[in-house]
Image (cartoon, helix red, strand yellow):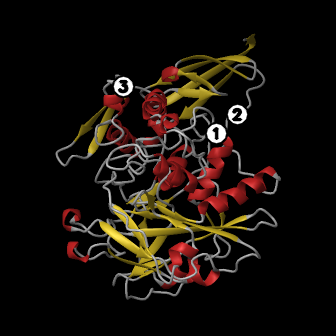
Amino acid sequence: MQTLTRQQPSKKTSPNMKPQRRRRFSPLMLIGGLVTLVIILGLGAFYVIQPHLGSHAAAINGDCSLIVPAHPLTAQGLATPYQLLATNPANGPCHEATATQAAFVQGAILDPATGKISVYNPLVVDRGTKPAIAPVVPNLPQDAIVALWFGSNGNTLTLQSSHSSTQEGRCVNGADRTIFGQFAYCNAPAFFDSANRAIQEGKLVPPALGKGKDGLVCPTVRDFSVIDMDQSDNVTTTYLITHNGQTAQMTATNTAKLQNSILQTNGSDNRLLDVALDGALGCTPWMEPDLADPGHTVSALPLNELQAAAHQAAPMALVPNHDPMVTVNNDTNLDKLNAYRAGVDQPVIQDTNLSNTKTYCMNYVNIAPQRILFDSLLTKKQASPDAGAANTLFTFLAQRFNATWGPDGLNCQGLLKQNSPIVVTNDADDVAIDAVINGTDVASTATSCSFNGTVVKNCTGTTNVNGQVCTLAFDKNTNQVNITCNPQQKK
């Protein structure tokens, strides 16, 4: 097996989130005489936070490995637990029950006859241990195309072969003798080739993005308002952890049997979108049947990438050449960049300059701060994905932007010679508690409103609704927007 060296990419947070959906607001048809509407802007939380496992992160080994079981792309291989262990035992052990070391596996299965996709998330256990409940053996369609993606809450994740499993699974952990970091995949290019063929034939149709409560198109993993320094990494897989550190697949049956277990989740861009942002904005992620949990559907990294490829408007965020997961010794590397892109259904290129990070940063600063500010009324009412980093989803997104913008991220600040437009306020524990964006203090001003795609700044002004001129007035005392429409006026 090829020896790969480890790099230290930016570390993701590891939110443990349980989603709670709220109904999406739908615009009202305005007809008849003079009409005044009152929109209540106060919103409740959309999910609750589960406690983290493992507390003293500084003393924990962040470099772990996964032993890939034999025949990983078969039904039996999918149902065989992956084993977690320390890449270098001298640095201390690795435990799946420790939130800052946990590794995750996500599988997707394409039926080439029908074009349908299903999801199966293989289990991870500590090396030499047994799962709390044996994984379900999935029933795969004939000639199924199976692929796997990996994520980690640690610093790095290295795949180790068992009985030539990584070769048989066509697994990619990195390139030019260096690993990506927290990410890896097996057979993903073949899966995406088949999925895109099914889309062209009309067998597979990625669902439309829809509009959120903010009136804007729901974001994707390739939206510059969602990405960070290392986009398209990690997965949406969750596991159950028992009091003695054993693991089990996250299914309805296992949850009922292991009532005192807690949820272990991967701190990922995909989960941030599918749970936190979609929950706040009232959007719905693409979900498909979970073969381990009959009758239930789940989201997945490949679904997010396929939907983004189909529907994300320009400019589309694609992995840039200075993403820390695709560099070698901090230098651009075409082979590694293309190896990563191939695993997330993004076009390969002939020159790293075609994925210029400076252009990426320009799009980032032109789009992300504005959307974060625009959605602040919704995201400020949403719990933070990581309570140790920020006190709300709004401040989490704000500090995440700054981390990406700075020298320890993509260094957009140096490339554009421009300071971040977001100023974050931290408390004594270095938790982000407030933010000012483009000079706007969200705590003291109303957010903007969007009606039929028209943005009304501070929810005060006029707009056209169904051919009528409507006046919006924001009332700070009641936190309401009063809308008055006169059918005699046409715009």
Label 2 vs 1, first from the N-terminus: 2
Q: Which residue is mark 3?
A: 416
Q: Which residue is mark 1?
A: 211
> Residue at position x 43%, y 29% from top?
365
Label 3 vs 1, first from the N-terminus: 1
- Frontmost of labels 2 and 3 is 3
**Residue 409 pos. (x, y %):** 33, 42
Q: Is residue 189 left or right of residue 173?
A: right
> Residue at position x 50%, y 51% from top?
232
Most foreground residue, 484 or 262: 262
Please, what is the three-letter code of the amino acid marked with disc 3? Leu
Q: Using the image, determine if residue 341 lies above or below residue 215.
A: below
Q: Which residue is mark 2?
A: 28
State the quadrant of the C terminus.
top right
Q: Residue 453: which quarter of the image?
A: top right
> Residue at position x 46%, y 31% from top?
479
**Residue 200 pos. (x, y %):** 79, 50
Q: Secondary structure at mark 3?
A: helix
Most foreground residue, 377 or 186: 186
Q: Secondary structure at mark 2?
A: loop
Label 2 vs 3, first from the N-terminus: 2
> Residue at position x 49%, y 77% from top?
123
Q: Could you give the CA–CA distance between mark 3 and mark 1, rounded to whole angstroms? A: 32 Å
**Residue 83 pos. (x, y %):** 42, 80
Q: Residue 138: which quarter of the image?
A: bottom right
